Image (cartoon, rainbow, N blue to C red):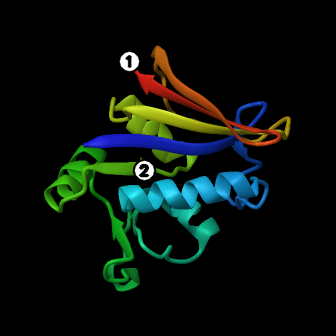
């Protein structure tokens, strides 16, 4: 299964001011690309705090919310599932259900877990023309030293660039 970390970052590499910061700071071009790519994959993995910033199901995609204490009563059939499965087990389950790729949508802790376990194949970063100075990094808890291979760069908008890397 192909796993793609898909994140918007500021020019200083942050994904938000804190874990409750919504993605209202990202460009229309990033939002459009996010919808297109997540619909292609069909499934997005979020942490509980990141899903709370989204706050609702996203049409045409399954959202899997990773949490230590899943509440099945919050599941919405075909739209939102809460799970405490470990990343490898979760990916195997999604593959068995017919998904061939998955988008890792954050936040920083989920990104760090998947990276540390060697489960991210590609990292797609939309670099937004913004600086926060301090805030939430792309990865929390990841103590790795990995090389990346540039796959593609493209301009999404006048001031917005997307960089795609393969994790080696």
In percent of the image, x 40 and y 30: which residue is there?
116
Q: Nearer the viewer, residue 113 or 130?
A: 130
Percent position (x, y) of residue 129? 83, 39
Left or right of residue 78: residue 149: right
Q: Quadrant of residue 88?
A: top left
Q: Label 1, on which residue?
A: 168
- Quadrant placement of the N terminus: top left
Considering the numbered disc 2 on the image, is that residue within a helix, a strand or a loop?
Answer: strand
Percent position (x, y) of residue 40? 40, 57
In percent of the image, x 42 and y 41: which residue is there?
4
Q: Label 2, on which residue?
A: 103
Which of disc 1 and disc 2 is earlier in sequence? 2
Q: Nearer the viewer, residue 129 or 104?
A: 129
Answer few, some or many: residues within 10 Å of disc 2's Cα (few below 14, many 20 plus, some between 14 and 19).
Answer: many
Considering the numbered disc 1 on the image, is that residue within a helix, a strand or a loop?
Answer: loop
Residue 73 visible within the image? yes
């Amino acid at each position: 299964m192909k796993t793609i970390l898909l994140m918007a970052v500021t020019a200083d590499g942050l994904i938000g001011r804190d874990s409750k910061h919504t993605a209202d700071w990202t460009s229309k071009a990033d939002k459009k690309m996010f919808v297109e790519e997540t619909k292609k994959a069909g499934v997005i993995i979020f942490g509980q705090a990141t899903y709370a910033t989204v706050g609702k199901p996203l049409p045409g995609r399954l959202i899997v919310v990773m949490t230590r204490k899943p509440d099945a009563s919050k599941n919405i059939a075909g739209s939102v599932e809460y799970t405490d499965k470990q990343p490898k087990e979760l990916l195997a389950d999604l593959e068995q259900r017919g998904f061939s790729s998955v988008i890792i949508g954050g936040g920083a802790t989920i990104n760090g877990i998947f990276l540390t376990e060697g489960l991210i194949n590609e990292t797609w970063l939309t670099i937004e023309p913004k600086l926060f100075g301090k805030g939430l990094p792309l990865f929390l808890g990841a103590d790795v030293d990995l090389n990346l291979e540039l796959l593609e760069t493209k301009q999404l908008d006048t001031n917005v660039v997307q960089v795609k890397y393969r994790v080696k």
